[in-house]
Image: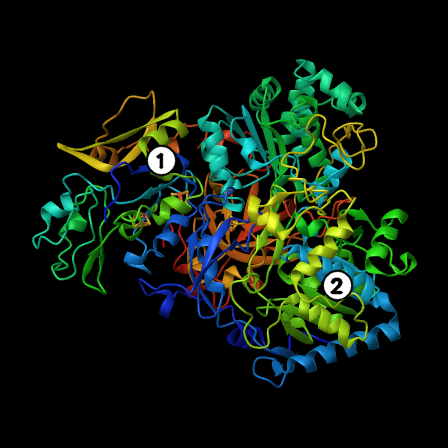
Amino acid sequence: MAHLPVSEIQLADHFGPHLAYARGVRLECGVEPDKLVKTHCCFCGQQCGIQLKVKGNEVIGFEPWEEFPFNRGMLCPKGVKRYLQDSHPDRLTTALMRDPREPGGFRRTPYTDAIQATADAIAKLQSEHGSSAFAMLSGASLTTEKTYLMGKFARVCLKTPYIDYNGRLCMVSAGAANKKAFGIDRAANPWSDIIGTEVVWISGANVAECAPITTNYVWQAREQGAKIIVVDPRITPLARTCDLFLPVKPGRDIALFNGVLHLMIQNDWIDHKFIETHTVGFEAVAESVQSWTPAKTAEVTGIAERSIRQAAEWWGQASTSFLMHARGIEHHSHGVQNVLGAINIVLASGRIGRPQCGYATITGQANGQGGREHGQKCDQLPGMRDLSNPEHRAHIARIWDVSPDDLPGPGVDAYEIFRKIDQGEIRGLLSICFNPVVSLPDNDFIARMLDKLDFYVAIDFFLNDSAQHADIVLPGSLQEEDEGTVTQIEGRVIRINQAVDPPGDARQDWRIIQDIAAALKRPHGFTFTEPREIFDELRRASQGGIADYSGITYEKIEQQFGVFWPCPSEDHPGTLRLFEKGSDNPIARGNGPFYFPDGKARFNQADYTPPKEDVDAEFPIILTTGRVVSQFLSGTQTRRIGPLVDQYPEPRLEIHPQLAARLQIADGDWTTITSRRGEITLLALVVKSIRPDTVFIPYHWAGPLSVNRITIAAQDPISKIPEYKVCAVRLTKAAAPPDGRFERTASGLASNGKGGRSA
Amino acid sequence: MSVPESLFFFLDPNRCIGCESCVQACSECDTHKGHSMIHLERVNRYESPQTIPVVCMHCDSPTCAEVCPADAIKRTEDGVVQTARKPRCIACSNCVLACPFGVPKMNTDYELMMKCDMCYDRTSEGKRPMCATVCPSQALFFGTHAEIQALRPRSRSLNTFQFGRQTIHTKVQMMVPREAPVMHIDVAAAWHDPQGEDEQDDPMLSAALFELPVLSN
Ligand code: SF4
Ligand code: SF4
Ligand code: SF4
């Protein structure tokens, strides 16, 4: 198929994004809801508890859920206004078939016809080109039940190795490094361990905007005496009041961790007993950081030597600590190395596996944790099992009632799927909960690849920017229209409860998948009647694996406000904290607390290499990307919620006044940012809160506002995460505003408060 | 129904991360649905991401009420200063001009002064106000003095403010560092401080923090 069926403007007229505001009963005072449904926010990995107010079949507002222990009623603006995504004018309520003669480019189609057409297209394509000519892209905002079903559907029904998920853009560097160092991929500690520690170290995490609730944990720690160290190229809202700010040059985090480890060893601020009893590989790592003197570390990282020494001193001498990191160190062509560097300073300190001694990656998506455990990853089977391990294959094949030989082998990562489309190997695609046209780097290439497919079917609740390229769109379900479980940031499995029914022909996603299986006449294993049945099969599938859910039940989750996995039996309460002394696990079998046969954690040498694309004379400035608090991921939902759009309507280029002055760019000037991939033009926001050699752009927008048009598709060799956090650009003041953009953007955008164009 | 005597509103701008959750949640309250009564001030985005939430301070002798020619602004016995009463308010904006904290807003659509009423629908039933419930940094906190003292040993609360010769006592409490002395700043003089913002030498706010040259070539 080729290109969008109709123009972008026609698509936008019909399918949005339109902005929803509170109207009608949602604005009335004193309305008694029919029910209050205790559930969780549909956005970030913290999964705040929230109660949805339901009247008729509509979510009309929210009420804080103050008993839920993680957030105790706290919510960020996305959680507060999420109810406006329900009953939205852009909501897909029928199936759609691509039809350029229709004004919106798509023809409404009876659901069963669309399912049959989908199955026919898949069957035809697979019979002509083989099973692996069809691929799937899935997502980590789905419930764990759905992610499990997606993995099973790809391997058992479609018999394709090619499934991957959008966690590839998110958690994989941390996951891979955690497995290398600890043998398990989960936050090691509950967030309550942050409070009461002496030092909180935050690397590459804009906590205030991307994990807002964590702020209160950090401030509470500080209230009780903790020193807060923040490592970031920007003074984020949380960095503003931290005790020590290390303004690292993007892409140089390993150097900092190695420099700190160097000082820890030099000053003997390491826990010899822990290292000896519970780890292997320290000597080689110690050797490898010998050259990382403070002077060299300062030179590479761009951080003042005295700040590095101060950080090492606080970290080295503490008796309790909590280290957290997020995409800032993970979105790199050496993201796994960065995380290993962070883990090395934790292991050398011996401060893990005890109360107030913690380590965690800050998971980004709603089900970022659960979504990476049960088999929608290209190389994985449920329970964090390995698709290339014969024993693991045999166990899952038994549960799925297929022969192990019939299970395909490992596939490729999400970006590689697009390269295989380019090479003609993959010709058909099913996507759900993934918007690659916005979220993958160098995304003009991605859009071209979607157009190159012979057949593309998307399941979604709004027609997102990628689904606009589809042949068939099947109307899926919003989070509040289904039930199931997700696993939040701490490794706590929680319940999503259904509040309303899907409207019109829209269906719960797992039903749609099963309907396709039935239409393909391959229904075996896809006849679940409710999510609980899927969960029960998942529990059995995960049994004995690392991510063991076998002892978790829906009832236990409700009784305990969630269950921390691993939970290997029904009388087991779950595992609040990993790696506690004397704790057991199925891999170590009593040999120690870590998930290796000898029970010991691994030090891994983390070698510094510069980013794939460093600055040069032609492209002399570093571009880094990230989020804002009011938007979420590719914006499919949050760009449709009026009050959230008003809070931060469009991306702006954050630039330091020194750099701006040199380039004669003033606050509020249209500025063109050019990389080797392309260019975009945005308004400049001149602020002192960023390194002068670096500019920042948030990534939630599509088309001409999408920063991922210019980011680089370099990937980490191990985790395959793209390098969103560094590429090289040049800036020029734009001669004129881009077509049609002036009126839309000049209003409503806060300026820096220093003159120039103001709001 | 009234707000329980033991419960107070505490503000700690030091904690604020500017997320606007308070602003978004305020408009979900039943007494002023669709209207947010909280102000979030961006102090100077050029210098810093610092933001400050401003709610009504619920003064013991409310200046807004004192200047109201129509006697439309009432302070209930529990110390909450209410939005102007619709039948009385003549939309003269005296209160808007007089409030030393800049809180009341004139809603011209309704010809009515509206302001933060500490979520009276909620607090008078023993619930917490919307903003203080959701605030992810707990820069806005609602509870007892004993609770906040236990949670924040490094701070203490203040509720006396000096504006020129006017001393104001408020129901809302401001958290300040426990040890630091209280300063009275002449706001009007500070307005014309000839020391420009760029001369800031606070290392957290200045470019000196970033020691590398802008561009290496
Ligand atoms: S987006 Fe995250 S922090 Fe915000 S309300 Fe939802 S779960 Fe909580
Ligand atoms: S909710 Fe809290 S942290 Fe967010 S802007 Fe308001 S006061 Fe500040
Ligand atoms: S107390 Fe209620 S009315 Fe006042 S600012 Fe907070 S949410 Fe708004």
Vertical position of residue B86 compared to residue B187: above or below: below
Extreme residue toward the bottom, this view? A101
Extreme residue toward the right, this view? A405
Please name the residue that numbered disc 1 is placed on. B12
- Let me know if residue B172 appears in the view: yes
Tell me residue A90's x, y (percent).
Answer: 52, 72
Query: For residue A309, what is the image quadrant?
Result: top right
Point out the image quarter for the C terminus of chain A. bottom left
| Kind of residue at badge 2 | Met
Query: For residue A161, what is the image quadrant?
Result: bottom right
Q: What is the crowding at mark 2: few (fewer than 14 residues within 10 Å), some, or many (at least 20)?
A: many
Tell me residue A119's x, y (percent).
Answer: 76, 76
Q: Nearer the viewer, residue A724 or A374?
A: A374
Query: Looking at the picture, do discs 2 and 1 lie on one chain?
Result: no
- Residue at 70 percent across and 59 percent down: it is A534
- Check mark 1 vs ligand 2: CB closer than 8 Å? yes or no: no
Tell me residue A732's x, y (percent).
Answer: 54, 52
| Kind of residue at badge 1 | Asp
- Residue at 68 percent across and 80 percent down: it is A112
- Let me know if residue A285 appears in the view: no
Please name the residue that numbered disc 2 is placed on. A136
